[in-house]
Image (cartoon, rainbow, N blue to C red):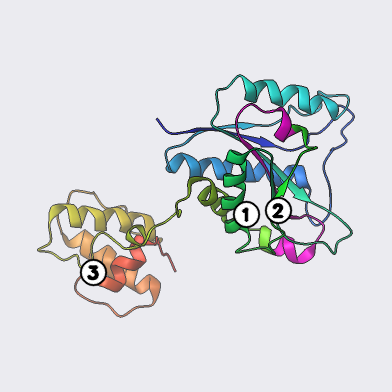
Amino acid sequence: MGKKVAISVGHSILKNGMCTSAEGEVNEYRYNKKLAPEIKKYLEKAGWNVTVIVCPEKRFQTKAEEKSYKLPLINKGNYDLAIELHLNASDGKGHGTEVYYTSSAGKKYAQAVQKKLSTLFKDREIKKGEKLYFLNGTKPPAILIESFFCDNKEDYKKGKNVKKVAKLIAEGITGKSGSSKEEQKPPYTTVKKTSSKEAIKWLQKKLNICYTGKLPNLKVDGIWGTKTEAMLKAYWKQLGWKIGTYAGEKTCKALHKNRKK
């Protein structure tokens, strides 16, 4: 079984409708509410067991209740790691990424995540967060991520791609790239009438995904028939390519990447 991690979305929306987070080019709480499930997807692909913790909206009277809600959930969950997601803010001029920690185990995760995020944002280095309740109140090793400055236009331009930010954070946590060179290569570089059934099935599945015209979906049976050939030709036409007689390396790469245009 993979490691267990709790991902906490920093801040909340109080009973009076006020959001306790920073606001700028993007709202800190709402951004991280989108970011957390994306990180979860990447971590689960790597075999981790992930729980996302979001404070219930319009239940708390004050932001102090956030602490009493999330810490017990984390501390009774037997997690290997706890993460809290935040965005920084200053006067619109501050920019960059930083990750906080307190324990030595947390420091290792902080360094790894910081290294990944700083490929996209300015590196503000990791910091010891001795006064942060999330880091001091959790039993498992913990890190607090300030991905970028929510009130900085340039930072938000980079951080707007939530999936990209999530992938970097997940890669830092797992120590693995989200897509290896092997995963980037198609399983076949040539598929033709005489290819194996498995190769033709792969081609048929991919054509059903990538072809966007009016032809009906192919039956994935591993048989190179007139319908398979017709859809392959229609796919080439869709891409504006010269019509051929079989799926070569260029076509296989396009299908592997789910290319539609």
Q: Position of residue 8 (x, y in %)?
A: 66, 35
Asked if residue 67 lies left or right of residue 92, the reply is left
Determine the image quadrant of residue 109.
top right
- Verify CB contact (< 8 Å) between mark 1 and mark 2: yes
Q: Which quadrant: the C terminus?
A: bottom left
Sequence-first tag of 3 and 2 = 2
Q: Nearer the viewer, mark 3 or mark 1?
A: 1
Q: Position of residue 226 (x, y in %)?
A: 18, 62
According to the picture, the residue beneath numbered tag 2 turns out to be: 98
- Verify CB contact (< 8 Å) between mark 3 and mark 2: no
Q: Which quadrant: the N terminus?
A: top left
**Residue found at x 54% / y 50%:** 172
According to the picture, the residue beneath numbered tag 3 turns out to be: 247
Q: Residues within 10 Å of mark 1 (few under 14, many from 20)?
A: many
Q: Position of residue 70 (x, y in %)?
A: 70, 26
Q: Secondary structure at mark 1?
A: helix
Q: Nearer the viewer, mark 3 or mark 2?
A: 2
**Residue found at x 17% / y 52%:** 198
Say which mark, if any, is on residue 114.
Answer: 1
Question: How far is the residue under mark 3 from the one under mark 1?
Answer: 42 Å
- Verify CB contact (< 8 Å) between mark 3 and mark 1: no
Asked whether 143 falls inside the magenta stretch, the response is yes
**Residue found at x 86% / y 26%:** 15
The kind of residue on which mark 2 rests is Glu
Range shown magenta: 134-157
Between residues 199 and 135, which one lies in front from this camera angle? 135
Asked whether 258 falls inside the magenta stretch, the response is no
